[in-house]
Image (spheres, rainbow, N blue to C red):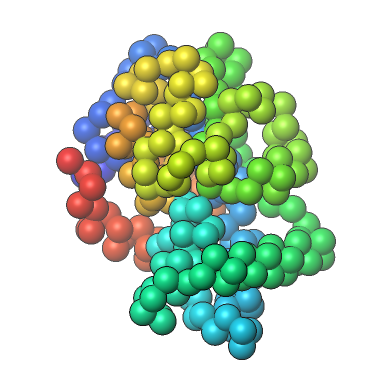
Amino acid sequence: TIHLHLTTPKMVTVGPRKLADDEVKGVIFDVDGTLLDTMPLFFPSWPRTGEQERFSLRVTEDDFYRLAGQPLPDMVQYLHRAQKGCDATPEFVREFLDEKIRIHKEDEAENGHPLAIAGVVALARDYKARGVPVAIATSGIKDIVLDHLKHAGLDDLVVETNMVFAADVPRGKPDPAIYLEAARRLGVDPSLCRAYEDGESGLQSAFEAGMEVIDVTFMDGYPAPTALRKAKEEQVKERAWLK
Protein backbone atom coordinates (compact mmCIF):
# COMPACT_ATOMS: atom_id res chain seq x y z
CA THR A 1 0.00 0.00 0.00
CA ILE A 2 1.29 3.46 -0.86
CA HIS A 3 -0.05 6.40 1.13
CA LEU A 4 0.56 10.00 0.07
CA HIS A 5 1.09 12.68 2.67
CA LEU A 6 2.32 16.20 2.43
CA THR A 7 5.23 17.71 4.26
CA THR A 8 7.65 19.86 2.30
CA PRO A 9 7.89 18.65 -0.45
CA LYS A 10 5.45 15.84 -1.35
CA MET A 11 6.58 12.44 -0.08
CA VAL A 12 5.34 8.91 -0.36
CA THR A 13 4.95 6.76 2.71
CA VAL A 14 5.23 3.00 2.30
CA GLY A 15 2.85 1.18 4.61
CA PRO A 16 0.46 2.43 7.28
CA ARG A 17 2.94 4.04 9.69
CA LYS A 18 2.77 7.82 9.57
CA LEU A 19 4.27 10.42 11.87
CA ALA A 20 3.39 14.09 12.09
CA ASP A 21 6.49 16.21 11.53
CA ASP A 22 6.59 17.26 15.18
CA GLU A 23 6.52 13.59 16.24
CA VAL A 24 9.71 12.76 14.33
CA LYS A 25 12.62 12.54 16.78
CA GLY A 26 15.22 11.11 14.39
CA VAL A 27 15.69 10.73 10.63
CA ILE A 28 17.75 8.13 8.79
CA PHE A 29 18.81 8.34 5.16
CA ASP A 30 20.15 5.76 2.78
CA VAL A 31 22.90 7.16 0.54
CA ASP A 32 23.11 5.55 -2.90
CA GLY A 33 19.98 6.44 -4.83
CA THR A 34 18.64 8.49 -1.90
CA LEU A 35 21.03 11.31 -1.05
CA LEU A 36 23.24 10.74 -4.09
CA ASP A 37 22.40 9.92 -7.71
CA THR A 38 24.87 7.05 -7.83
CA MET A 39 22.82 4.23 -9.31
CA PRO A 40 23.18 5.03 -13.04
CA LEU A 41 26.93 5.46 -12.45
CA PHE A 42 27.26 2.20 -10.51
CA PHE A 43 25.46 0.02 -13.04
CA PRO A 44 27.95 -0.15 -15.99
CA SER A 45 30.70 -1.81 -13.93
CA TRP A 46 28.39 -4.75 -13.11
CA PRO A 47 27.88 -6.15 -16.64
CA ARG A 48 31.46 -5.27 -17.62
CA THR A 49 32.69 -7.40 -14.72
CA GLY A 50 30.17 -10.18 -15.21
CA GLU A 51 30.95 -10.64 -18.90
CA GLN A 52 34.56 -11.54 -18.15
CA GLU A 53 35.17 -15.26 -18.77
CA ARG A 54 36.41 -15.92 -15.23
CA PHE A 55 33.04 -14.76 -13.83
CA SER A 56 30.50 -15.38 -16.60
CA LEU A 57 27.56 -13.71 -14.84
CA ARG A 58 24.89 -11.84 -16.75
CA VAL A 59 23.82 -8.59 -15.06
CA THR A 60 21.00 -6.67 -16.71
CA GLU A 61 19.82 -3.21 -15.75
CA ASP A 62 16.57 -4.78 -14.55
CA ASP A 63 18.55 -7.15 -12.28
CA PHE A 64 20.54 -4.21 -10.93
CA TYR A 65 17.53 -2.14 -9.90
CA ARG A 66 15.64 -5.11 -8.46
CA LEU A 67 18.61 -5.93 -6.22
CA ALA A 68 19.43 -2.31 -5.37
CA GLY A 69 20.14 -1.63 -1.73
CA GLN A 70 21.43 -5.06 -0.77
CA PRO A 71 25.07 -5.47 0.30
CA LEU A 72 27.27 -6.05 -2.74
CA PRO A 73 28.27 -9.63 -1.76
CA ASP A 74 24.59 -10.54 -1.43
CA MET A 75 23.92 -9.21 -4.93
CA VAL A 76 26.72 -11.36 -6.35
CA GLN A 77 25.45 -14.44 -4.50
CA TYR A 78 21.89 -13.91 -5.75
CA LEU A 79 23.04 -13.70 -9.37
CA HIS A 80 25.36 -16.70 -8.97
CA ARG A 81 22.61 -18.90 -7.48
CA ALA A 82 20.09 -17.82 -10.11
CA GLN A 83 22.41 -18.52 -13.05
CA LYS A 84 24.69 -21.31 -11.84
CA GLY A 85 22.44 -23.08 -9.33
CA CYS A 86 24.86 -22.95 -6.40
CA ASP A 87 26.55 -20.58 -3.98
CA ALA A 88 29.61 -18.67 -5.13
CA THR A 89 32.82 -19.28 -3.20
CA PRO A 90 34.09 -16.47 -0.97
CA GLU A 91 37.03 -16.12 -3.38
CA PHE A 92 34.70 -15.67 -6.35
CA VAL A 93 32.70 -12.97 -4.55
CA ARG A 94 35.83 -11.14 -3.42
CA GLU A 95 37.48 -11.24 -6.86
CA PHE A 96 34.25 -10.19 -8.60
CA LEU A 97 33.79 -7.19 -6.31
CA ASP A 98 37.45 -6.19 -6.46
CA GLU A 99 37.18 -6.10 -10.26
CA LYS A 100 33.81 -4.35 -10.21
CA ILE A 101 35.16 -1.63 -7.89
CA ARG A 102 38.31 -1.24 -10.01
CA ILE A 103 36.22 -0.70 -13.15
CA HIS A 104 33.90 1.71 -11.36
CA LYS A 105 36.80 3.81 -10.10
CA GLU A 106 38.18 3.98 -13.65
CA ASP A 107 34.79 5.15 -14.88
CA GLU A 108 34.50 7.66 -12.07
CA ALA A 109 37.93 9.12 -12.78
CA GLU A 110 36.78 9.72 -16.35
CA ASN A 111 33.14 10.74 -15.80
CA GLY A 112 33.19 12.41 -12.40
CA HIS A 113 31.54 11.77 -9.04
CA PRO A 114 27.79 11.37 -8.41
CA LEU A 115 25.68 14.46 -7.82
CA ALA A 116 23.46 15.09 -4.83
CA ILE A 117 19.71 14.53 -5.24
CA ALA A 118 18.65 18.07 -4.42
CA GLY A 119 15.15 17.46 -3.03
CA VAL A 120 16.29 14.77 -0.61
CA VAL A 121 19.36 16.70 0.53
CA ALA A 122 17.16 19.77 1.18
CA LEU A 123 15.02 17.66 3.51
CA ALA A 124 18.07 16.35 5.35
CA ARG A 125 19.50 19.84 5.81
CA ASP A 126 16.14 21.14 7.01
CA TYR A 127 15.95 18.43 9.67
CA LYS A 128 19.48 19.24 10.79
CA ALA A 129 18.70 22.96 10.96
CA ARG A 130 15.66 22.21 13.14
CA GLY A 131 17.76 20.14 15.53
CA VAL A 132 16.38 16.73 14.53
CA PRO A 133 19.26 14.21 14.70
CA VAL A 134 20.24 12.69 11.35
CA ALA A 135 21.87 9.32 10.62
CA ILE A 136 22.87 7.33 7.55
CA ALA A 137 22.21 3.62 6.95
CA THR A 138 23.94 2.40 3.80
CA SER A 139 24.94 -0.86 2.15
CA GLY A 140 27.79 1.03 0.51
CA ILE A 141 31.50 0.57 1.15
CA LYS A 142 32.68 3.10 3.73
CA ASP A 143 35.61 4.71 1.91
CA ILE A 144 33.61 5.05 -1.31
CA VAL A 145 30.58 6.51 0.48
CA LEU A 146 32.70 9.04 2.39
CA ASP A 147 34.49 10.08 -0.81
CA HIS A 148 31.20 10.53 -2.66
CA LEU A 149 29.66 12.57 0.16
CA LYS A 150 32.73 14.80 0.26
CA HIS A 151 32.71 15.45 -3.49
CA ALA A 152 28.98 16.22 -3.37
CA GLY A 153 29.55 18.76 -0.59
CA LEU A 154 27.70 16.65 1.97
CA ASP A 155 30.52 15.67 4.30
CA ASP A 156 29.12 18.05 6.94
CA LEU A 157 25.62 16.54 6.86
CA VAL A 158 26.07 13.61 9.26
CA VAL A 159 28.77 12.99 11.85
CA GLU A 160 30.66 9.78 11.12
CA THR A 161 29.56 8.16 14.39
CA ASN A 162 25.97 8.33 13.06
CA MET A 163 26.86 6.58 9.81
CA VAL A 164 26.08 2.86 9.74
CA PHE A 165 27.55 0.68 6.98
CA ALA A 166 26.72 -2.90 6.01
CA ALA A 167 30.01 -4.01 7.55
CA ASP A 168 28.84 -2.68 10.94
CA VAL A 169 25.95 -5.12 11.34
CA PRO A 170 25.68 -8.93 11.16
CA ARG A 171 23.10 -8.93 8.35
CA GLY A 172 22.52 -6.37 5.62
CA LYS A 173 19.31 -5.03 4.12
CA PRO A 174 16.52 -6.23 3.96
CA ASP A 175 17.25 -7.33 7.53
CA PRO A 176 16.31 -4.48 9.93
CA ALA A 177 19.64 -4.57 11.81
CA ILE A 178 21.19 -1.58 10.03
CA TYR A 179 18.22 0.70 10.76
CA LEU A 180 17.94 -0.49 14.34
CA GLU A 181 21.64 0.29 14.82
CA ALA A 182 21.19 3.75 13.28
CA ALA A 183 18.30 4.49 15.69
CA ARG A 184 20.40 3.22 18.60
CA ARG A 185 23.24 5.56 17.68
CA LEU A 186 20.80 8.48 17.55
CA GLY A 187 19.35 7.45 20.91
CA VAL A 188 15.84 7.48 19.43
CA ASP A 189 13.14 4.80 19.58
CA PRO A 190 12.73 3.32 16.06
CA SER A 191 8.98 4.05 16.15
CA LEU A 192 9.81 7.78 16.31
CA CYS A 193 12.21 7.64 13.33
CA ARG A 194 11.45 8.52 9.71
CA ALA A 195 13.54 6.62 7.15
CA TYR A 196 14.26 7.70 3.58
CA GLU A 197 15.06 5.00 1.02
CA ASP A 198 15.01 4.19 -2.68
CA GLY A 199 15.66 0.41 -2.92
CA GLU A 200 13.16 -2.31 -2.06
CA SER A 201 15.53 -4.05 0.34
CA GLY A 202 16.09 -0.80 2.21
CA LEU A 203 12.39 0.01 2.39
CA GLN A 204 11.78 -3.44 3.87
CA SER A 205 14.68 -3.05 6.30
CA ALA A 206 13.40 0.24 7.69
CA PHE A 207 9.79 -0.98 7.80
CA GLU A 208 10.73 -4.11 9.74
CA ALA A 209 12.72 -1.91 12.14
CA GLY A 210 9.38 -0.27 13.02
CA MET A 211 9.92 3.11 11.35
CA GLU A 212 7.87 5.36 9.12
CA VAL A 213 9.30 4.73 5.65
CA ILE A 214 9.51 7.22 2.77
CA ASP A 215 10.20 6.06 -0.80
CA VAL A 216 12.14 8.96 -2.29
CA THR A 217 11.78 7.65 -5.85
CA PHE A 218 8.20 8.95 -5.90
CA MET A 219 9.21 12.48 -4.87
CA ASP A 220 8.83 15.25 -7.42
CA GLY A 221 12.01 15.75 -9.42
CA TYR A 222 13.58 12.41 -8.51
CA PRO A 223 15.97 11.23 -11.30
CA ALA A 224 14.38 7.84 -12.07
CA PRO A 225 15.62 5.80 -15.06
CA THR A 226 13.09 3.66 -16.94
CA ALA A 227 14.54 0.44 -15.50
CA LEU A 228 13.99 1.76 -11.98
CA ARG A 229 10.36 2.63 -12.70
CA LYS A 230 9.84 -0.86 -14.14
CA ALA A 231 11.40 -2.49 -11.07
CA LYS A 232 9.24 -0.33 -8.80
CA GLU A 233 6.03 -1.40 -10.51
CA GLU A 234 6.93 -5.07 -10.09
CA GLN A 235 8.11 -4.69 -6.50
CA VAL A 236 5.00 -2.82 -5.35
CA LYS A 237 2.85 -5.70 -6.68
CA GLU A 238 5.03 -8.34 -5.01
CA ARG A 239 5.43 -6.59 -1.64
CA ALA A 240 4.66 -9.55 0.66
CA TRP A 241 6.72 -8.06 3.51
CA LEU A 242 4.33 -5.12 3.92
CA LYS A 243 1.93 -6.05 6.70
Asked whether residue 161 is in view, the answer is yes
| Residue occupying the point 45% across, 74% down | 80
| Residue occupying the point 47% across, 15% down | 187
- Position of the N terminus, as image quadrant, is top left
> Residue 87 versus residue 15: which sits nearer the camera?
87
- Position in image of residue 127 (x %, y %): 54, 20
> Residue 76 versus residue 104: which sits nearer the camera?
76
| Residue occupying the point 43% across, 45% down | 171
Would you say 156 lies left or right of 59 here? right
- Position in image of residue 118 (x %, y %): 61, 39
> Residue 226 versus residue 48: which sits nearer the camera?
48
Figure disc tally:
0
Asked whether residue 61 is in view, the answer is no
Would you say 235 lies left or right of 151 here? left
- Position of the C terminus, as image quadrant, is top left
Point out the residue furthest to the right here.
Answer: 109
| Residue occupying the point 41% across, 81% down | 84
- Position in image of residue 12 (x %, y %): 35, 39
Point out the residue furthest to the left here.
Answer: 243
- Position in image of residue 203 (x %, y %): 37, 43
Residue 101, above or below 14:
below
Would you say 112 lies left or right of 240 here? right
Place residue 49 in its image quadrant.
bottom right
Residue 208, above or below 51:
above
